[in-house]
Amino acid sequence: MSTEPVSRLQHILAAGAFAVTAECGPPRGSDPDAVARRAATLKGCSDAVNITDNQTAIVRMSSIAGCSHLVRDGLEPVMQMVTRDRNRIALQSDILGAYSLGIRNILCLSGDHQTFGSQPDALNVFDIDSIQLLHAVRTMRDQGLDMSGFQLSCPPRMFIGAAANPFADPFEYRIVRLAKKIDAGADFIQTQCVYNLERFRTWMRMAADAGLTERAYILAGVTPLKSAGMARYMAEKVAGMDIPESVISRMSDVPGEKAADEGIAICLETIAALREISGVHGVHIMAIGWEEKVRDIVESAGLMPRPDVP
Amino acid sequence: MIVGEQKSIAELQKIIAPYKKILILGCGTCTKTCFAGGEDEVATLASALRLACRKNGTGISIEELTIERQCENEFIQEAAPAASRNEAVLSLACGAGVQAVARRFGTTPVLPGVNTTFIGVLERQGIFTEECVGCGDCRLALYGGICPIARCSKKLLNGPCGGSKNGKCEINPDTDCAWQLIIERLTALGQLDNLRTYIPPVDWRSSNSGGPRKLVREDHII
Amino acid sequence: MDNTCTPVITVFCCTHTSTEGSPLFPDDVSGADLRIIRLACTGMLKDVFLLRAFESGSDAVVVLACPEGDCLHSEGNIRAARRVTYTRGILEQVGIDSQRLVMCNIAPGDAEAASQALRHAAAVLTDTDGGLS
């Protein structure tokens, strides 16, 4: 990874602090203030905010635009970029544009298949995969070259991230894949949300054994559960999700109106446990549709105030 | 083989509506094998369309003929007399065959009766699976004989995404996760290390993305 | 259906269910004109045979096959069932009531079961108007 931190998030991680990132989905419309309104509650309680890229293949305001609005409002965005919708020409072009707009963090993903979204009839692109994108962004940053080998004027110097899912199949291969992402250029990793701490600890141990925790900052994902229904839905319908029966029982054993509180309690216990795991450098709170709870969670977890960056 | 499915009777009725005298031309190779356009399917379709037209009160005269394949002039020319006797040809070949026949019988409308879908194999009787998308730069050796471009829904070359569940692709529980299969096959071959190497982006110029392709074999041209 | 016309029913059966000597339909149970086509095995049925029967004037078609699990040629009756189902789909697309295509598994020479199948087909004809006329 580059020696001089290029973003606020990188600065905080390099200084050894436990980072907090959050997530925000752009609107299904063009309102320029919508992103700022959603992200307003995240200001001051997170070090950076991910803006998703047509998540679940549902057409929304672009991530680059959403990130640009955050920059304007003094928040630090992480631009998520999927390879599903854009070929290498468009991806590189957007990376150059993003950097010019003050965006300094990028998360490289393949993206959910378009059959899930609002336009299942669209042609998918997948010109390159997420690992090739990581490689491309790192080459642009460290060598100033685009994918054709052209020397860029003012290369984009981004802090580069990738997603990892410790709970997906096939389990044995997950560490090989993590290694490939870090080899290709990932400086930081945000994981799928953690409910099964045992399995997560195993994955972290395997990552440490492979020397990977020394080479990239791993931020563990957490998502507070709102209801037993949500827990069951995620366990059954969302690919790559591992929610132990014990967690689902906790959610369904409490009366309906207390479920949300129980979900927050589980979330706080998870964060406390994650802070104890060697190699975990932060937490990525994905409270989609429940962004207003993030401040409470961060506060109750004892992670306030967030560090200042010179 | 090339795999396709016959269009619905409703759609075919619309396609042949302008014509009173048609030739249904079958193909004895690929579309016969996938039960879309062989001799039996020609006979069945002709009968079905006649019944449909009778029900509508419209008349239709249907001639039936099947040739070995519709992608070679040598066989297409056998259909010339039949084509000239009719107002239109409804071809049950793959898209390539339809176009070859249309080229040959330039002044007779040649209509498609089959939706051509993929290059595939017969997994077992009655089941056909897509295996190849003709990328033009075969890398099956690296992946133990399983193609991530054709069989991974996201064309990933550097390993699976996080959506694989019980060895099935996130988009459809009936679709195998190609990467699960690749990992299992390479493990069986003792070649799992193939997957540690970074695979760079595909050069799509050799695929249809680079424009429609042509193969010229000078050594076979007299 | 014009009630003054005698309905026409085509029957496809295999040489196992109906042997040459003993007639399968000793009594005229359906009041229909019967056309009987014997195949070596119902597994040899092609969709086009069933459709051409309708084309050539049949109001209903009955397929009589060996009992389930007991086809003389092991899978013939299963193949026949597949063809019948598929052809019913075509009939529906074409606007003909698919109930006019009937399939029954009967023991060899079981005239009662054969007659029942015929009566069923004849009943369909009086109930529905999904034929060609």
Image (tube, rainbow, N blue to C red):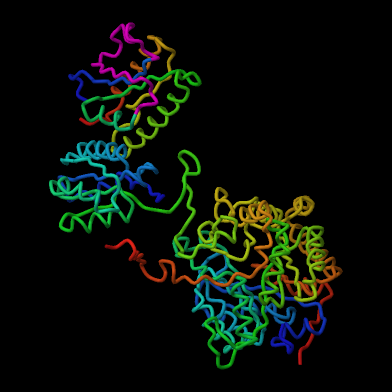
At 41% from the left and 71% from the top, the residue drawn is: B210
In this rendered view, identify the residue nearer to me: B16 or A147: A147
In this rendered view, identify the residue nearer to me: A52 or A10: A10
The boundaries of the magenta stretch are: C16-45
At 64% from the left and 57% from the top, the residue drawn is: A239
- B50 vs B122, left or right, is left
Q: Is residue C26 above or below residue A60?
A: above
Q: Position of residue A233 (x, y in %)?
A: 65, 54
Q: What residue occupies the far left of the structure in this picture?
A: B85
| Residue A72 shows in the view | no
- A215 vs A80, left or right, is right
In this rendered view, identify the residue nearer to me: A40 or B193: B193
Residue A241 magenta: no
**Which quadrant: the N terminus of chain C?**
top left
Q: Position of residue B179 (x, y in %)?
A: 61, 57
Q: Is residue B175 above or below residue A287?
A: above
- B195 vs A44, left or right, is left
Q: Position of residue C28 (x, y in %)?
A: 28, 9
Quadrant housing residue C6 = top left
Residue C24 magenta: yes
Q: Position of residue A211 (x, y in %)?
A: 80, 71
